[in-house]
Image (tube, helix red, strand yellow):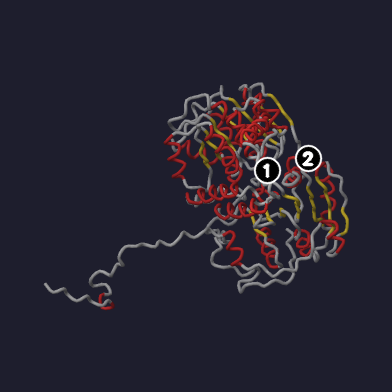
Amino acid sequence: MERSAWGSRPMNSRGGRPERGGWDDRPRRDGSNGWGRGDDGRSRPERREAGQAREWNHGRRDEARRGEAHRGEAPAAVAPRVAKKPRAEAVKRQLRRSEGFAELGVPQLMASLLAGQGIAVPFPIQAATIPDALAGRDVLGRGQTGSGKTLAFGLPTITRLAAREPSKDSRPGAVLLAPTRELAMQMHDVLRPLAQTMGLSIVLVAGGMSYTPQLRALQRGVDIVVATPGRLIDLIERGAADLSVTEIIVLDEADEMADMGFMPEVTRILDEIPGSAQHLLFSATLDNQVDELVRRYLRNPVEHGVDSAQASVTTMRHELLAVSARERAGIIAQTVNRPGRTIVFVRTQVDADDTADALRHVGIMAGALHGGLPQGLRARVLHAFREGRIPVLVATDVAARGIDVDDVSLVLQADPPHDSKDYLHRAGRTARAGEEGLVISLVTARQRGRMARITREAGVDARPRPAHEGEVLAELTGGTRPEGAPITEEQYRGIVAPPRPPRRQGSGPRRFPRHGHGDHNRARRPREQS
């Protein structure tokens, strides 16, 4: 395994790693808290508190209120003054904007809510699949992450369930499966306001989160369950979830579930659901396991293929940079030191930590994301990346499968992908929904033959070109040599550490020690005269 040569860096007395503060809650190498487990974190103990789920949702609400300023919208305080239009005209304009979804059969309440969020025109995958899904047909949709699949299956699911009686027990009307916690969280955050608008309840059920809120929600009754396969199986075995009356089952990123080894759990969940239920399956590819799933469970599915992985590479610029081990570290730093969001892909969890540490040491705010981190820390790092407070994210392949972030302008493959499929998954983090993007892959002399095969299979036409630090690299990548001061652990902690609860400032009387416990340090009050 090749390791990054980062040159001289300040190391601690234990060797090999920069000094860290006591706040770092990542797993240790001794395995005491799950170090060395799989990137998906399925074998880790369930250590996440319920408050972290609330913290994540609170952060997402704050992000929505801020209007995603990183998209370039002018703040209200500096917006140019314009003449106000009559309210009736504004309402009519909003309704006209929402006609795209309404014409597909989406209720006007949800169409207007989407229009208020700036979502007026359906994406191709949405326009293709929503009518068939609303008609109750089984659907097989092929599309990449970021193509709009969540609304493609979410809007028909909510619409159909709104016509039935609300659930009053632990038997949901719909189950939506996602391969990772992060993807399930994002799915839940997108669909929750839409479901609530239609009077439906929705709950997130995922590993790494406290059981208590999930159990209570199921006991109260829930219409839609957004889940990861492992946790849902656990709740079924506990008797807390019952899928005997489920009418709609959605499998999102089915190929990722197969790659991560979730097919036994997925098939068991499908066996728990009535055969008459509607099946909506979305996948980027139809590998052997996914194809078998389709043949076994879907009934005469309508297939819609939109935004294939090979087709999406045409909206990206691909560059292969031939680098030496000696210059690799400096080239990484200069490449990512540019405006916009950047995702750096590395091979292992240790490489992710070391690369992020090294970038912060040269003044670039970077955060690591991998399955060895506690779920709360992963959520905070990803949230900071969305907000732009961490512009550079260093991730492993499995952890990045849960990333659904717009406006990623650069994907840097510091380590080569395993195969062409991984190349396309990595590249798919940029150039979302037809936007342009840049994909740069670093290649050493020993990796040239392998990368040539991978890019050829991925449909990418790119040849390695020599790369060195300096002006030529700046013209090619848009990055500049970092010249900022090192980012301290305290500065990074201020972004990703959990918020401290406010101190309680009670107004009651001060308590004194009980008699016999420190009374000799307390001045005795004089007895009152009777």
To which residue does mark 1 refer?
83
Alpha-carbon neighbours of circle 1 within 10 Å: few (<14), some, or many (≥20)? few
Return the residue nearer the eye: 68 or 129.
68
The residue depicted at 42 percent of the width and 36 percent of the height is 219
Residue 330 rendering spot, x and y as whole percentages: 78, 65
When the figure is inspected, residue 220 is found, relative to residue 9, above or below; the finding is above
Quarter of the C terminus within the rendering: bottom left
Residue 102 rendering spot, x and y as whole percentages: 64, 27
Quarter of the N terminus within the rendering: bottom right
Q: Earlier in the sequence, mark 2 or mark 1?
A: 1
Quarter location, residue 270: top right
The residue depicted at 62 percent of the width and 72 percent of the height is 12
When the figure is inspected, residue 38 is found, relative to residue 117, above or below; the finding is below
- Mark 2, secondary structure of its residue: helix
Q: Amino acid at mark 2?
A: Ser
Quarter location, residue 305: top right
Q: Return the mark for residue 99.
A: none
Q: Amino acid at mark 1?
A: Ala
Return the residue nearer the eye: 12 or 467.
467
Return the residue nearer the eye: 248 or 418.
248
Quarter location, residue 340: bottom right
Q: Estimate the spatial distance between the alpha carbons at disc 2 and disc 1, rounded to whole Å.
A: 41 Å
Residue 420 rendering spot, x and y as whole percentages: 77, 44
- Mark 1, secondary structure of its residue: loop
Alpha-carbon neighbours of circle 2 within 10 Å: few (<14), some, or many (≥20)? many
To which residue does mark 2 refer?
312
Return the residue nearer the eye: 387 or 309.
387
